[in-house]
Image: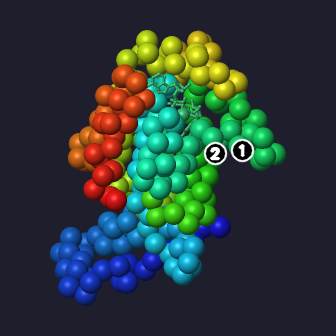
Amino acid sequence: MWRRGVSLSSMLSSSKSRLLNQMQVACGFNACQVFSTHVLNPIVAEDGVSGARRKPFVTFVLGSGPGSGKGTQCTRIVNTFGFTHLSVGDLLRKEIYSDSENGSMILDTIKEGKIVPSEVTVKLIKKAIEASENNRILVDGFPRSEENRIAYERVGGVEPDIVLFFDCPKEEMVKRVLNRNQGRIDDNIDTVKERLSVFEELNLPVIKYYSEKGILHKIDGTGTEDEIYERVLPIFAALR
Ligand SMILES: Nc1ncnc2c1ncn2[C@@H]1O[C@H](COP(=O)(O)OP(=O)(O)O)[C@@H](O)[C@H]1O
Ligand SMILES: O=c1ccn([C@@H]2O[C@H](COP(=O)(O)OP(=O)(O)O)[C@@H](O)[C@H]2O)c(=O)[nH]1
Ligand SMILES: [Mg+2]
């Protein structure tokens, strides 16, 4: 269930409210419209002990394509730093097998290497974050397009705190995916080619956006899993 938003007035100190009122009068715009993405329907998680609502520390985990090592490194981050790992691909795959009305559409979309509509994905992510009792969340494999990103911000009212980007050459990613051996319908050469082209067209602008915001951590995704994790560790060390 979607939770109610926090009122603007409770979010702002009285001096900020006064300033906003002055801006409204001077510019003729509605302060609620300007700030609405930050206060409407914020994504919050339940505190398992007190039941209180709070905004978790959210890390988006992206890569230069399928097989860049997102899931593998997420598992390690979970083990060391106690994050909850939300693989958006896994959330979608679960939907396929859960009799959901969107199941066959999701199956077809994944098979073709395309992107599932934001409306479906964002709802699943929001529900999973809200159900989590953890204050640290890894969202793996999302957003895959600017439209995804904007939909999440609009619905959740927040941006991620940081974004990881695993950068790996195409040949290496293709080799890893074709050896992944998890029985996935999209781990074949045709779908992988499509996913790589979808990455360049739709995912790259998202990477650029977060880079310009100064919250992107680009990580060399080549070498052994251990070597890559050594590059990840310092990013989270300050959180311990
Ligand atoms: N550094 C690495 N070197 C070799 N194989 C790797 C490495 N990291 C991950 N793999 C393997 O490559 C495949 C894809 O990794 P995965 O973490 O699922 O990538 P992604 O989630 O980005 O698609 C998996 O079979 C995984 O075990
Ligand atoms: O936000 C998302 C995440 C995944 N997918 C779909 O799910 C597939 C598998 O995603 P996953 O992250 O599991 O693949 P990975 O990159 O880890 O191989 C993608 O190709 C898309 O078709 C999507 O549409 N939106
Ligand atoms: Mg993955």
Residue position marked by numbered label 1 in the rendering: 95
SS class of the residue under badge 2? helix
Q: Disc 2 to disc 1, how far (Cα)?
A: 6 Å
Q: Nearer the viewer, residue 162 or 30?
A: 162
Rendered view: 145 above or below 186: below
* Left or right of 39, for residue 13: left
Few, some or many residues within 10 Å of mark 1 (<14, 14–19, 20+): some
Residue 149 shows in this picture: no
Mark number for residue 158?
Answer: none
Contact (Cβ within 8 Å) of mark 2 with mark 1: yes
The N terminus lies in quadrant:
bottom right
Residue position marked by numbered label 2 in the rendering: 91
Rendered view: 128 above or below 143: below
SS class of the residue under badge 1? helix
Residue drawn at the location 71% of the way across and 43% of the way down:
94
Query: From the Cβ of disc 1, is ligand 2 less than 8 Å away?
Result: no
